[in-house]
Image (tube, helix red, strand yellow):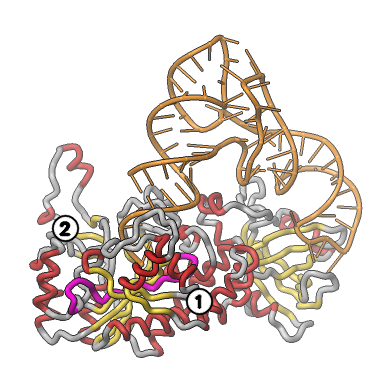
RNA sequence: UCCCCUGUAGCUCAGUCGGUAGAGCAGUUGGCUGUUAACCAAUUGGUCGUAGGUUCGAGUCCUACCGGGGGAGCCA
């Protein structure tokens, strides 16, 4: 007999037939004539109740089965005579794969704090919350792929090891085979010519520059992969290793970028609601009440578009006492972003045309020479979720902007070549995958939406 | 990196004015029971984050360091 996933068993239209399930025991309750096991196999939030009758109760291996043990149960799917569940399995045969010593097994039936569960990241996927989070993570990854694939975007792979000294997005991790221990002892200095690649290399902070090259060859592309930032940020919204989605469109301007971003957000949110109804109901009742309604309203609403200059005007006229100053040329702080999206517009809003001084060198300069064709999507609850721009496609302007930003154009000869030969207008954006998951699930800490988080001083598991 | 809070049993926490360690849960044992946050009774379990200091005496006060949380900056 073949194993059936518990999600399928619980959805059965009929009963009375034989089933084989395999999973991990969530709880065990003993009665005089029967043992009740709640078994979960990760396919869904719900457990299946297994009934072990008198004939097997005395078996020594079954006597030791407790929370955390893994079992296979072959039996008959029957309607449950008691309240609490529609079906249960009357066990005919139970095989114990692995026991879990109750004296040391850290997961209890009660609720644990997320801080504690983070210390046992190797076992936390066995809890309701983390099972649900990782099923949503899967659904969202698939939603991203299906959205872009349906639109004809090519999924491209950009390098993880890069020789670009600075991609303009924070501190980078070095990649080296040099013997650092030896250097420390002898007081020697790193000679990167001697290193594995013959030059200094790092882990990528973004695949965007390479993504642009592929867009300027293949049309519409997207990357979806890990990125690394060696910033010493200790917050609930930053990871040292995180996943990023970066679409890039050739022959596209800022307006196309905005339309793509709006459609993209609406689509991945609705696919999560559609594919993970039970898990979303769990987040709505246990993690963040109202999250489903909130997502549904985002899917329904038209997003607002304002220029940075207009946004600053709104903030100046708001009469709100902000902790940080508001003024043209200053970057918008979290509190300002949240005021715009939560208090003023009460919906997602794109802020465009930022001052060039506070944005990256590759963003296209507007005719006013003061602003660039950047866009940030702000959403209620978290603030910025997407950042993007139309790229500077004029060779001479890009070269000037690069020099002004203190970058060495020789290092980026390959990037500049894309503007020397067949340059074309193009635009794209970046979405932090984990932040999107945080938004959909309502999970407060980004460390709890990735299975094994990497943060400063933390790389266990 | 900065500011604030915090660290006591496996987990969640209490511990008064500085006087020598507590609860609930889980675990263990026994009882009851188609149970479902099961229930009832008994019971094991502690270098109070680490290192100094003040004091007759420190979980409690002081200093430094380490860990965790919240906020900020940077950003995605």
Q: Which chain carries label 1?
A: A
Q: Is residue A311 magenta?
A: no
How crowded pointer 2 is (Cα within 10 Å; few <14, some 14-19, many 20+) is rated as some
> Label 1: which residue?
A139
Residues in magenta?
A367-382
Query: Spatial distance from mark 1 to mark 2, Cα to Cα?
Result: 38 Å
- Image point 68% across, 75% down: which residue? A20
Q: In this view, does A352 lie to the left or right of A265?
A: left
Q: Judging from the image, what secondary structure is the residue with disc 1 in?
A: helix
Along the viewing direction, whichever of A139 and A290 lies nearer the viewer: A290
Task: Indicate the position of residue A415 as horizontal and vertical percent values.
Answer: 15, 74
Judging from the image, mark 2 belongs to the subunit labelled A
Residue, x 73% and y 86% (percent of image)? A13
Point 46% across, 83% down: residue: A302
Q: Is A370 inside the magenta-drawn segment?
A: yes
**x and y percentages locating residue A114 in the rendered image:** 55, 54
In the rendered structure, the answer to whether residue A97 lies left or right of residue A384 reads right
Residue behind mark 2: A200
Q: Earlier in the sequence, mark 1 or mark 2?
A: 1
Q: How crowded is mark 1: few (under 14 residues within 10 Å), some or many (20 or more)?
A: some
User: Where B26 sits versus A309, above or below?
Assistant: above
């Amino acid at each position: 007999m073949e194993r059936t996933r518990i999600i399928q068993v619980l959805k059965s239209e009929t009963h009375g037939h034989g089933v084989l399930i395999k999973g991990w025991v969530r709880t065990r309750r003993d009665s005089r004539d029967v043992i009740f096991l709640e078994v979960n196999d990760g396919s869904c939030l719900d457990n299946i109740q297994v009934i072990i009758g008198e004939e097997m109760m005395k078996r020594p291996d079954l006597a030791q089965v407790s929370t955390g043990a893994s079992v296979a149960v072959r039996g008959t799917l029957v309607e449950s005579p008691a309240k609490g569940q529609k079906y249960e399995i009357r066990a005919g045969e139970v095989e114990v794969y692995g026991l879990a010593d109750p004296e040391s097994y850290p997961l209890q039936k009660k609720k644990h704090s997320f801080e504690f569960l983070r210390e046992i990241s190797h076992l936390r996927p066995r809890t309701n919350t983390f099972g649900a989070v990782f099923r949503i993570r899967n659904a969202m990854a698939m939603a991203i792929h299906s959205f872009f694939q349906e639109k004809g975007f090519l999924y491209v792979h950009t390098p993880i090891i890069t020789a670009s000294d600075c991609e303009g997005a924070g501190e980078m991790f070095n990649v080296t085979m040099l013997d650092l221990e030896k250097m420390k002892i002898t007081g020697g200095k790193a000679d990167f010519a001697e290193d594995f690649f013959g030059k200094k290399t790092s882990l990528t902070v973004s695949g965007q520059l390479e993504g642009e090259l592929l867009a300027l060859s293949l049309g519409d592309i997207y990357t979806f992969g890990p990125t690394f930032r060696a910033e010493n940020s200790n917050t609930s919204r930053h990871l040292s290793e995180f996943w990023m989605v970066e679409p890039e469109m050739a022959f596209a301007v800022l307006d196309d970028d905005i339309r793509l971003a709006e459609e993209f957000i609406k689509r991945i949110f609705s696919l999560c609601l559609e594919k993970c109804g039970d898990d979303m109901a769990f987040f709505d009742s246990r993690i963040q009440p109202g999250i489903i309604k909130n997502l549904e309203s985002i899917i329904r609403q038209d997003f607002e578009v304002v220029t940075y200059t207009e946004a600053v005007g709104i903030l100046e006229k708001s009469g709100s006492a902000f902790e940080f100053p508001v003024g043209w040329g200053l970057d918008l702080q979290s509190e300002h972003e949240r005021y715009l999206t939560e208090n003023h517009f009460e919906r997602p809003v794109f802020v465009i045309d930022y001052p060039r001084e506070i944005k990256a060198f590759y963003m296209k300069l507007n005719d006013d020479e003061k602003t660039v064709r950047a866009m940030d999507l702000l959403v209620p609850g978290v603030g910025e979720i997407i950042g993007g721009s139309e790229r500077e496609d004029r060779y001479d302007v890009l070269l000037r902007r690069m020099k002004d930003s203190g970058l060495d154009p020789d290092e980026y000869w390959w990037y500049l070549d894309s503007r020397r030969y067949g340059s074309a207008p193009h635009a794209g954006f970046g979405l932090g995958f984990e932040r999107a998951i945080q938004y959909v699930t309502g999970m407060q800490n980004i460390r709890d939406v990735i299975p094994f988080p990497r943060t400063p001083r933390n790389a266990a598991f």
